[in-house]
Image: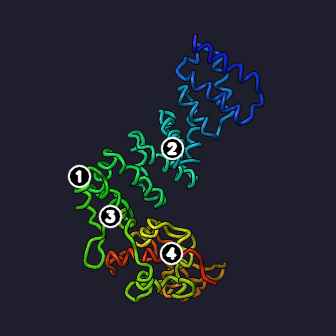
Amino acid sequence: MRGRLFIALAVGLTIAWPSAASAQTNLQLEALKRLKNLDLESNPALKKIVLKHLEASRGKPAFVEIVRDFKLNGHEAELIRFAQAHPNDSTGVEAIRLALTEPGLKLVADAVNGTDPNAALATTEALANAQSPKTEPILLGAVVDNTKPLALRIVAVNGLAKAKTGARALLAEAKAGRLPADLNFAVGNAMRGVRWKNLRAQATKLFPPPQGLGQALPPLAELVAMKGDIANGEKVFFRPQSTCATCHQVNGRGIDFGPKLSGIGTKLGKEALYLSVLDPNAGIPFGYEAWLLKTKNSGEALGIITSQTDDEVTLKLPGGITITHNTADIVSRAQLPTSIMPPGLQATMTPQDLVDMIAYLHSLKQAKP
């Protein structure tokens, strides 16, 4: 009797407001939620209403809720699109979990391995947040595929490390020597922080924590939480042994080679700033990719291409010097997968010096005129 009453209410609401406003639509959806356990196949009138609202809700959280509440099949493609648009939101994660059916897993794998880099990354982010055993083969496949962008593979690493089975799989790949070398920092950072003591101990042996000046650095999460001295951080940044100012400028001070850092505090949070120092390969800014040129006289030049024409290629070298090469003299050119910024700069600092320097960089909110 109660089910019939709510069906009548849902039908009545739909008939009464064919062009319902937002509040009225929400009322209809609330009425439908009361009917979520009813069999749609035995209630044609209700099924018609549900499918009508489903179609009207494409691209909205209500679409995910209706698919979930009424256990609707065959909507994996739309669920994946929603998850790609909201990979770090609860509803987006629920959408990808609902899409992990047999046909949906194929669509997900196609997206991760497809030619659209934005869709591939967003899908991987959603899978990493889903924490489902069904996603682990796809994430692990992405991790060991060094043709994929490093940012995507790091997301996959972090996703695997959230589950015990995924963490075990990462360790197995590491022990077998199948992990690309550019993932060592990311895997070590993720695995040294897992909650399973045995796996954490194995990871620490395989991936020792990075060393500061004479001592191991605390885990990244602890570094982010530590308080830094901005004034001392400025001194650390500009002192010669840190070498930071030999490639970066802050408000005109330093050498113009790498990205200018005058407003870096508005662009990157503390964790991202730590990663840029501890693992420079994790995020190479666009336009600052390292190129290796080989010339006819057997010379080599490593730097950043600042301009090129049919006749010339201009390369900026570490230290800020630019050299122009005739295209006819270049035998080959190759973009390197690694950052031109060297790893291991933290070894010139104590852990507190590193914390202070990051605090200084994070304080740089606006470039000075």
What is the secondary structure assignment of the residue under circle 4? Answer: loop
The percent position of residue 282, horizontal first and vertical second, equals 44, 65
Q: Nearer the viewer, residue 359 or 319?
A: 359
- Which one is closest to the eye, mark 4 or mark 1? 4
The answer to whether the residue labelled 4 contacts the one labelled 2, judged by CB atoms less than 8 Å apart, is no
Mark linked to residue 197:
1
Q: In the rendered image, which residue does mark 3 sit on?
A: 219
Foreground disc of the pair 3, 4:
4
Name which residue type carries label 2.
Ser
Total marks drawn? 4
User: What residue is disc 2 on?
Assistant: 90
Observer able to see residue 87:
yes
The alpha-carbon separation of the residues under discs 4 and 1 comes to: 36 Å
Indicate which disc, 3 or 1, sits on the residue closer to the N terminus.
1
Identify which residue is drawn at 56% across, 79% down. Answer: 262
Determine contact: label 4, label 1, CB under 8 Å: no
x, y (%) of residue 136? 39, 44
Q: Distance between the residues labelled 1 and 2?
A: 29 Å
Question: For the residues marked 3 and 1, what is the alpha-carbon distance in whole angstroms?
Answer: 15 Å
Looking at the rendered structure, the secondary structure element under dot 1 is helix
Q: Where is residue 230 in the image (x, y as percent from the top left)?
A: 44, 79
- Say which label, 4 or 2, has the lower sequence index: 2
**Under tag 3, what secondary structure?**
loop
Residue labelled with disc 4: 363
Q: Can residue 327 be seen in this view?
A: no
